[in-house]
Amino acid sequence: FMKKSIERNKKLIAGEEGKIQAVIKKNSKTKFIASAKGYWYAYSIKNIKDTITPKKGDIAFFDYEIKDLKGNIIYTKQEIGPQTYYVDKQNIMMGLRDGIKIMHKKEKINFLFTSQMGYGYHGDDKKIGTNMPLLCIVTLRDFMSEADYKKELELKTEITSQIKSQDTITQ
């Protein structure tokens, strides 16, 4: 049974990779890079000034949208909303988990993920079907250390409480 399951998975991934290769071939003007983790990516906006990328212990702030390989929107950036991600400490799509760590601030990257790097066999039980390869367009707005993020939150809380205390009128 296990051997059959492994063979079935290999065929499935090979089929999905074939579909991804077709997308890459169709978009020949776009330079897609194959990652070591089994996904492909191309820059829409590249930041060549910065050298640092998010790492474990950082908080990444990003937006993304999800499309099928034909370019049809599955989830818009607005539907998903701005993301605050504790790098390597939160459970997110495997492809995004790795992809975020290759990005620099203000970059926008198109990722092509096999279902294994996306939502896998189950999909998301809503709009993403089983074994569905995906195109994710990700913009990394910013990232910072968890310590800096906590300081920033404390500062915002302090300012908000000061404003609220000024708003109360005593009689």
Image (cartoon, rainbow, N blue to C red):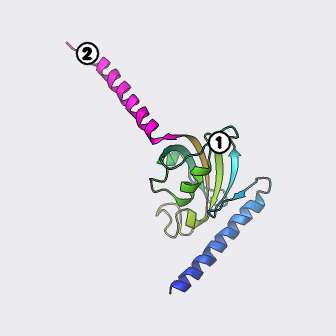
Q: Relative to the observer, which residue lies in front, 170 or 41?
A: 41
- Closer to the camera, 150 or 115? 150
Which image quadrant is residue 15 in?
bottom right
Q: Secondary structure at mark 2?
A: loop
Amino acid type, mark 1: Thr
Write the residue at 62% across / 72% down.
Answer: 13
Disc 1 element: loop
Q: Which residues are magenta?
A: 143-171
Residue extending furthest toward the right: 29
> What amino acid is labelled 2 in the image?
Ile
* Residue 132 image-quadrant placement: bottom right
Percent of width and height locating residue 102: 62, 50
For marks 1 and 2, the one nearer the N-term is 1
Q: Which residue is mark 2?
A: 169
* Residue 54: % across, % down: 55, 46
Could you tell me if residue 83 is visible in this image?
no
Rendered location of residue 118, percent (x, y): 55, 62
**Quadrant of the image occupied by residue 7:** bottom right
Check residue 45 for magenta coloring.
no
Q: In percent of the image, x 64 and y 69: which residue is there?
A: 16
Q: Nearer the viewer, mark 1 or mark 2?
A: 1
49, above or below 23, in the image: above
Q: Does residue 152 belong to the magenta stretch?
A: yes
Residue 143 is at least partly visible in this image: yes
* Residue 159 to residue 7: above or below: above
Main SS type for the magenta part? helix
| Residue in view at x 61 percent, y 77 percent | 10
Q: Which residue is mark 1?
A: 51
Q: Position of residue 109 (x, y in %)?
A: 65, 49
44 is higher (above) or lower (below) than 35? above
